[in-house]
Amino acid sequence: MNITIIVPSLPYPLNSGGAQAVFNMIDKTRGKNSITLVCIPSRLTRRRHVAELKEKWPDVDIVIYPYLRQLADLWFLKEKAVRALKLLFRKNSRAFVVERALKPYGTHFNGRLKRFIDKVVLLSEPDVIQVEFFPLLPIVGFLPKDVRRVFVHHELRFVRNERLLRDIDLTDREKMYERGVKGEEIARLNEYDRVVTLTDTDKHILQENGVTTAISVSPAAIGSPVRPYVKWQNKLLFLGGYGHKPNVEGLEWFVKSVAPKIAWEKFPNVKFHLVGGGWPDKVTEKYRSELAIPFIYEGFVPRLEDVATGSIMVVPILTGSGMRMKILEASALCIPFITTSVGVEGLGFAHRDSCIVEDSAELWAASLSELMASEAMRHRLSEKAQRIFKAEYSVEALADRRMEVYQFQSVTPYEKNSGLLRNL
């Protein structure tokens, strides 16, 4: 089967849950399909990363829409400059928080991009075109209707917006705009031939909100190795990059609201490790001064198990939707974790059966203290979570499940013009 996959960023290196989701699914299905990966980035893509990925995937055609073509568009350039200034001077203002939620930014859908997509489709001759991530949702208007079009919805934007803005008293105009953004998301999803969600929860939410297109559930996969349980080594670990707002929000909540409620003198040797790329020095220094325990910023690490082994993972996710890859990471590595109902939403892990799930700062502090004090609890929860991971979320099983999504169309395989794509 010929599959053309369109994503907003190169899924390499594996420095985010989204990158892992795309990378692992392609990695496990490329031997069964002829795949063209099209990246339409909103920032410069490093040539070194492209070269490394092509070396790993010699059988995948990787096509990058040049970022300079987007910068050549004066409208895009102006929007980028204005957004950069607002991030610098108005980042935490109420108006800008609302704007960032309700005005998606990153790709300009102009005639130049349409001609590029037309050429890719002509040369790759796809049986299925798969688009991933909300920023590229509108690209369905550029896709031919005689080819099956699939959209993989990693995070429901209107759910993310509702949770992000729930504590802000929106004006009537802002409420109307929020409804309009949601309506457009639903309408665009209904233009696809199939929608893929990562969880059953997201599927039901879409159906309840007017999505009539057929919806399949196909969870994302991680490539972390399965490791045996290792006794706790007095480490708390937070995993997540600075570029994803729920990570910043969750860590801020932990530092400001949860940590001060813990009697750290009972755990004198505990250290807090932050793993993830892009965290500014001023932010990490602030957390280092505010936490009552040692704070260590690890940055991006190529092998999570090198840092995470022997830790308790804290996953204080308050907003967003979709599937939390970091929870699967913890389960594969047999690491106990504590999270929220939003963090575990749609996943098969249950409170005090395979993890700890709490939603208030007080209960988080009490349950984390209990988890740090009990080796028996850590061991029991970790092993149960890993059994669930092996049964339901292994990369092999999830890759087979994704292949079933494509079977809604009978196809006739044919040879692809692969060599020509490299010259786009």
Image (spheres, rainbow, N blue to C red):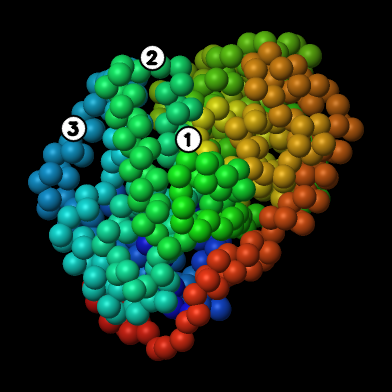
Q: Earlier in the sequence, mark 2 or mark 3?
A: 3
Residue placed most toward the observer, 289 or 229: 229
Could you say whether the residue bearing mark 1 is in a helix, strand or loop? Answer: helix
Residue 39 position, x and y percent, is 34, 60
Residue type pointed to by label 3: Val
Question: Which residue is farthest bottom?
Answer: 415
- The residue positioned 76% from the left and 56% from the top of the image is 390
- The residue positioned 30% from the left and 57% from the top of the image is 139
- For label 3, the residue is 82
Q: Residues within 10 Å of mark 3 (few under 14, many from 20)?
A: few
- For label 1, the residue is 159
- The residue positioned 68% from the left and 64% from the top of the image is 397
Please identify the quadrant where the C terminus is shown: bottom left
Residue placed most toward the observer, 77 or 348: 348
Residue 228 position, x and y percent, is 81, 50
Q: Residues within 10 Å of mark 1 (few under 14, many from 20)?
A: some
Q: Earlier in the sequence, mark 1 or mark 2?
A: 1
Question: Which residue is farthest left?
Answer: 74
The quadrant holding residue 5 is bottom left
Task: Say if mark 1 contacts mark 2, CB within 8 Å.
Answer: no
- For label 2, the residue is 169
Distance (Cα) linking label 3 and label 1: 26 Å
